[in-house]
Image: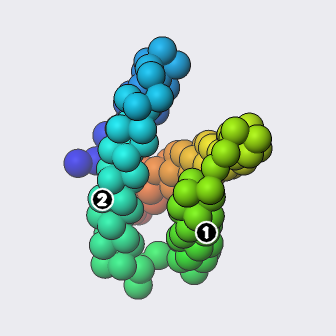
Amino acid sequence: MTLKNRFNGLVDRAKQGQDHLEAAQDKAKADLQQDVDAAKAKAKAHHENVEAKVDAAEDNASSAWSDLKDSWNTHVSKVKSDFSAKEAKLDAKLAAQEADLAESDASYAIDVALSAIEEAEDAVVYAIYARKYPDDLV
């Protein structure tokens, strides 16, 4: 699979996410809980897959990407830990505060994803450029 095709996969996945979020607006709480559980399982599986790829390619990756990976893993662990601890204690008064925190975390995740997409685009363009450079030397 080419880098361009993989990047296009980001666009497709973002569209799927948008469609899923629009549909979630009309779902009942129980259905949303199932979606949350499924999303957690899917995110965990994807995370493990990415970890395996990153570990395999880490020798070739820049330290900045490794630092970003470590930082993101720390953030994800903290958010999951905090959410799990708080989820058990929620009451009506704290529900709004928890929703605010969840929205803040979601906003941060979106910002990180957008930044990652921009970095991915830049990396793909550079890879295309770097691949063409040797061709000019021949």
Dot 2 surroundings within 10 Å: few (below 14), some, or many (20 or more)? Answer: few
Residue drawn 40% across the image and 31% down it: 30
Question: Which residue was labeled with disc 2?
Answer: 45
Residue drawn 42% across the image and 38% down it: 33
Residue drawn 33% across the image and 53% down it: 41
Write down the quadrant of residue 103 in the picture: top right
Where is residue 105 drawn, in percent x and y?
A: 66, 49
State whether residue 49 appears in this view: yes
Q: Nearer the viewer, mark 1 or mark 2?
A: 1
Write down the quadrant of residue 65 in the picture: bottom right
Q: Secondary structure at mark 1?
A: helix
Vertically, is 71 above or below 63?
above
**Which one is earlier in the sequence, the residue at label 1 or at label 2?**
2
Question: Which residue was labeled with disc 1?
Answer: 78
Q: Is residue 50 left or right of residue 85?
A: left
Q: CA distance from mark 1 to mark 2?
A: 18 Å
Where is residue 92 drawn, in percent x and y?
A: 69, 39
Q: Secondary structure at mark 2?
A: helix
- As drawn, the residue found furthest toward the top would be 26
- As drawn, the residue found furthest toward the bottom would be 59
Residue drawn 41% across the image and 84% down it: 59
Vertically, is 86 above or below 53?
above
Relative depth, front residue between 103 and 99: 99
State whether residue 136 appears in this view: no
Where is residue 42 drawn, in percent x and y?
A: 32, 50
Where is residue 3 drawn, in percent x and y?
A: 35, 49
Q: Amino acid at mark 2?
A: Ala
Q: Amino acid at mark 1?
A: Lys
